[in-house]
């Protein structure tokens, strides 16, 4: 599983980092940054899906 | 006395005491009708979308639904006269392209990393407020507690005297509460806020200091230019107005909720890891803020003929209760897994202070529940609410 953030539509709600702090962090402006490059470990995949389901801007894309 | 509402779809009244007390059944009625975007002629006229999809779509369409006017009421006559007429409340009143730098300049002080430094101070403040009433066995959770927290945090950030707390609060209520139905008071309160910050700014120019946000703004540059004074005054105006009533309302509503739900207090004691998810759920259900937009040009939206200059309410609290988006939306489910709530708005105006607001809400609730784990409402019917732009309890007596 891979995760990408659409920077155009991310407006920094930080709900991804609340749902999955291991995967998402924040830049200086409060927008999302990915903390894991490449494949998301199996034990974090549930959290990645939850982060996606909590982003009000639908800025997170998950590819499996 | 306000004329009774005949038909919610064509005559809603957001200031009606019955609406303020329980807007949710009214939102439901409108949302499930053939006309989920209601209209009223009251208070200068406005449109009210109630479906999640519509509210979000409108918030995203910033070229048509502009932020030239963001209050749910029309401005007072003469509001655009006088020495501070050009002072607005950037970035909330800004549209692109200016909105971009107006917002960029304040975002860094509100990132999760930056606001973390207010945690300990907020906790100490909450404890000292509780010390005042814990031995009495009763307290006003809104007036003795929630009300005092955000205003002091903001005053600390801006570097303005904490002793002026009462004045700040009364100015903000003059703009957002009593001022809703009294445009003169609203304009007068805004002028007080802006003249206060004008004095603060002049003082910092004369005696430069370090470490507070107003001082930082006096030193900041945008594309090689000093930041203009009317922008600094506008931002300070906004931080006070946007940061105080909103957060205090969220803290108050949540304490009101916990007072009536011992099972939820227990659930969090047993599962402290649920706190972050629980806070988002409480923000969804008790979203305090409704904003507005002004229609730029004649447009048809979902079959509604909107005219240039019309006001549209950004009914985030209604969107958050839409069953098309949230399963059993009226049920508070502290472990709700899918929650794209829009309590902090949607799109380019997403609440810049959301990370600070979350911190204040979390610390205020956790500190209260640690010290006062068991409490209940003295009289559920005696709780009073403010509504319109910002909804929350204003008097909420509890016993413990
Ligand atoms: C629970 C508390 C709060 C809620 C529910 C809330 C809600 C909102 C909402 C819905 C918006 C979007 C406005 C729009 O779409 O027109 C907004 C904008 C804003 N809020 Fe908050 N707010 C809260 C606390 C705060 C705090 C503590 C601050 C900081 C002191 C703050 C500062 C701002 C600013 C600066 C904007 C404008 C952002 C922009 O236009 O780019 N808010 N807020
Ligand atoms: S929740 Fe969505 S919009 Fe918010 S920071 Fe994360 S990716 Fe960005």
Image (cartoon, coloured by chain):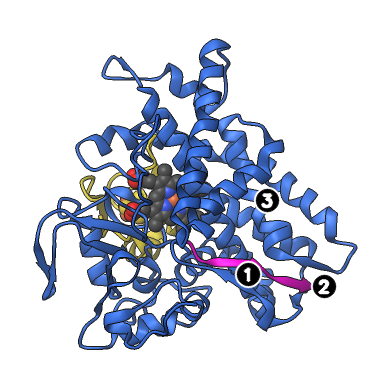
Q: Residue at x 37, y 31 (%)?
A: B105
Secondary structure under badge 1? loop
Task: Report the chain shown in yellow.
Answer: A
Q: Crowdedness of circle 2 by 10 Å Cα count: few (<14), some, many (20+)? A: some
Quadrant of residue B386 in the image? bottom right
Residue designated by label 1? B271
Callout 2: chain: B
Secondary structure under badge 3? helix
Q: Are marks 1 and 2 on the same chain?
A: yes
Between the C-alphas of marks 3 and 1, the distance is: 29 Å
Q: Main secondary structure of the magenta part?
A: strand
Q: Crowdedness of circle 1 by 10 Å Cα count: few (<14), some, many (20+)? A: few
Between the C-alphas of marks 1 and 2, the distance is: 23 Å
Split into 4 quadrants, where in the image is the N terminus of chain A? bottom left
Relative to residue B245, is residue B53 depicted above or below? below
What percent of the width, then of the height, locates residue B162? Answer: 68, 36
What percent of the width, then of the height, locates residue B281? Answer: 48, 69
Q: Nearer the viewer, residue B382 or B283?
A: B382
Left or right of B260: which side holds A57? left
Left or right of B69: which side holds B273? right
Task: Report the chain shown in blue.
Answer: B
Part of the protein shown in magenta:
B390-399
Callout 1: chain: B
Left or right of A16: which side holds B381? right
Split into 4 quadrants, where in the image is the C terminus of chain A? bottom left
Left or right of A51: which side holds B148? right
Q: Are marks 3 and 1 on the same chain?
A: yes
Which numbered disc, 3 or 1, marks the residue that appears first in the sequence?
3
What percent of the width, then of the height, locates residue B193? Answer: 52, 38
Residue designated by label 2? B400
Which of discs 1 and 2 lies nearer the camera? The answer is 2
């Amino acid at each position: 599983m891979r995760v990408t953030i659409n920077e155009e539509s991310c407006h920094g709600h930080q709900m991804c980092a609340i749902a999955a702090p291991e995967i998402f962090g924040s830049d200086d402006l409060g927008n999302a940054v990915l903390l894991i490059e490449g494949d998301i470990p199996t034990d974090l995949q549930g959290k990645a899906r939850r982060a996606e389901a909590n982003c009000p801007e639908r800025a997170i894309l998950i590819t499996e | 006395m306000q004329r009774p509402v005949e038909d919610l779809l064509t005559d809603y009244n957001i200031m009606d005491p019955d609406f303020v007390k329980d807007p949710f059944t009214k939102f439901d009625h409108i949302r499930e009708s053939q006309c989920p975007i209601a209209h009223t002629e009251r208070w200068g006229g406005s449109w009210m979308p109630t479906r999640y999809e519509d509210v979000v779509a409108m918030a995203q369409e910033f070229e048509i639904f502009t932020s030239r006017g963001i209050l749910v009421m029309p401005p007072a006559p003469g509001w655009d006269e006088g020495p501070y007429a050009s002072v607005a409340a950037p970035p909330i009143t800004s549209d692109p392209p200016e909105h971009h730098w107006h917002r960029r300049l304040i975002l860094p002080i509100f990132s999760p990393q930056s606001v973390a430094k207010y945690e300990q101070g907020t906790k100490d403040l909450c404890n000292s407020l509780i010390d005042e009433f814990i031995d009495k066995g009763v307290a006003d959770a809104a007036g003795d507690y929630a009300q005092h927290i955000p205003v002091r945090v903001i005053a600390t950030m801006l570097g303005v005297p904490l002793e002026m707390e009462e004045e700040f609060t009364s100015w903000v209520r003059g703009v957002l509460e009593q001022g809703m139905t009294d445009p003169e008071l609203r304009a007068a309160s805004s002028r007080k806020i802006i003249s206060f910050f004008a004095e603060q700014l002049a003082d910092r120019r004369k005696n430069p200091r370090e470490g507070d946000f107003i001082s930082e703004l006096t030193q900041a540059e945008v594309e090689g230019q000093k930041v203009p004074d009317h922008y600094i005054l506008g931002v300070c105006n906004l931080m006070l107005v946007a940061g105080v009533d909103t957060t205090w309302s969220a803290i108050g509503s949540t304490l009101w909720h916990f007072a009536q739900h011992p099972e939820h207090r227990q659930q969090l004691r047993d599962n402290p890891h649920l706190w972050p998810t629980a806070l988002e759920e409480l923000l969804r259900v008790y979203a305090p803020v409704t904003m507005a937009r002004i229609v730029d040009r004649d447009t048809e939206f979902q079959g509604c003929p909107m005219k240039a200059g019309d006001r549209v309410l950004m009914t985030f609290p209604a969107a958050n209760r839409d069953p098309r988006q949230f399963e059993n939306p009226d049920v508070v489910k502290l472990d709700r897994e899918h929650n794209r709530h829009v309590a902090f708005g949607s799109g380019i105006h997403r609440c810049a202070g959301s990370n600070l607001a979350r911190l204040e809400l979390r610390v205020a609730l956790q500190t209260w529940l640690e010290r006062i784990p068991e409490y209940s409402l003295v009289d559920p019917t005696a709780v009073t609410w403010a509504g319109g732009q910002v909804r929350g309890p204003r008097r909420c007596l509890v016993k413990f």
